[in-house]
Image (cartoon, rainbow, N blue to C red):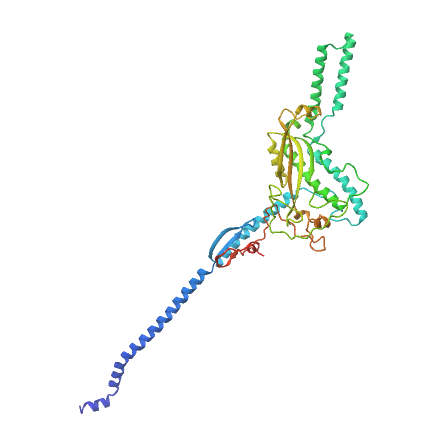
Amino acid sequence: MKNLVPWLKSHWIIPVLTLVALAALPTAWYFAEDMHATDLAAFQQRVNADNDSVDQKKSATQTVYIPSVDGTGHQLEKTAVVNEALIKRYGEIWTEVQSKIGGVSEKGIAFNKGDHKLLIDGLFPSPADRITADNKGREFIERNMQFHKILLADMKSGEPAKTEDIAKTLSDRQQAEEQRVKAELGRDLDANERAKLTEELVGLRLAALRKRAAEISVYADMSIFEGVPTSIPEKAPTVVQCWDMQEKAWIDQDICKAVALANAKASAGVPDSVVKRISKISIHPPAYAVGEQNPSPAPFEAGEDKPPLDFGVSITGRVSGPGHRNRWYDVRAVSIEIVASSARMPQFINALSATNFVTVLDLDLAKVEPLTDLREGFDYGDEYVVRASIVLETVWLRDWRKQPMPPVVQAALGMAEGADAGAAAPAAAAAAPSPRTRPPAAGKPAAAPGGGRGGRGADRGD
């Protein structure tokens, strides 16, 4: 013991370190347990945060879609977490759809406009002054009559052989034969000779009718165009009256073009034609009053993003004019009467739709008595024919018609905004349903927040 004390004094560091080491074991264990609990709590917090982030992403799913072309619904609809790649892809798809829609729309406008041109310059949309209006109005009437004569010529139309001319030819032939027999035989024709002469005269008459029928493709003359003047009036028409005649001329042009198209393969004249005779082309009045006074302006209507439909009006549902909120096009009905091949009538209907936006609303067929018409000079050939009364619906886009349209007509159709009759609403882009329904901007597909569906505002991109 005596030796231990001096040794401890000289080597005190050893027992001190030993005691510290022994005391550190429970202390380290205590603090290690505390650190473990702290780290575990921190890790749990990170796990909970990540889990909450996943839940938030799940709740952030949205329904993305491409608006349908007609604006009535959605296409390529998908519910997912919106990310950059998804938005980019839908944007690319929508850009492609827009480019195709634009192409179709432009083709629709070009198809509707066709080769329709103003009959004269300097009258539409409004003449410079009253004197110009009167002079241009009379010039328009003259040009309108010439234009319709050209339409008849383009159809290879013509009147039937004149019965009075045929009658004179037959009378001359009969007298010549009677005089010959009397001069040679000193007597009148006997029963057999008269029967033979009658048969010859009938043959000559048929030959004359068929010769004329072979020279033309369809029986028609200026009288078929209802409302086309036959002379220049002393009092010049108003610009509103001239515009109505201008649009009627375009409709007449389309119908005549359809007849020519249906008869294009006819090589033997009328007997080989589909449409053999046109009796009438009557264009129904527009949606505004056409008279000496300017029509009353209708309240401005901005219209909808797509044309309205009312199937109580017609089988197509297409309507236009004041009160219908149609800013895209105007509808004009036409009644025509023709004699046509019964079996090949569909060829004429197809020709109408191939010419412009024309739809058959009503078709009534009646029997034709060929002998009755033959007495009047109309030879239809051996094919069975019918008399058809047809009501057509023609559609005229405002996109290309608005610029030359007189301001007072724009106002009468509800196109003019405010007091300025020339500030008409934006014109149409295509036929109904229009492919120019305004969707979201390119590269920004519509999305309904919270996984729901977007409303009409999302469809339009307003």
Compared across the picture, whether 447 is left or right of 393 comes to left
Front residue of this view, candidates 148 and 372: 372
Compared across the picture, whether 8 is left or right of 71 comes to left
On screen, 153 above or below 62? above
- For the N terminus, the quadrant is bottom left
Q: Quadrant of residue 358?
A: top right
Q: Horizontal and vertical percent for residue 375?
A: 70, 23
Q: Residue furthest front?
A: 312
On screen, 72 above or below 280? below
Q: How many marks?
A: 0
Q: Horizontal and vertical percent for residue 346?
A: 60, 33
**Do we see residue 194 in this rendering?**
yes
- For the C terminus, the quadrant is bottom right
Q: Quadrant of residue 363?
A: top right
Q: Horizontal and vertical percent for residue 263?
A: 64, 32
Q: Horizontal and vertical percent for residue 13?
A: 26, 86
On screen, 266 above or below 444? above
Q: Residue furthest top?
A: 185
On screen, 186 above or below 242? above
**Do we see residue 269 in this rendering?**
no
Compared across the picture, whether 301 is left or right of 101 comes to right
Front residue of this view, candidates 132 and 190: 190
In percent of the image, x 72 and y 12: which residue is there? 194
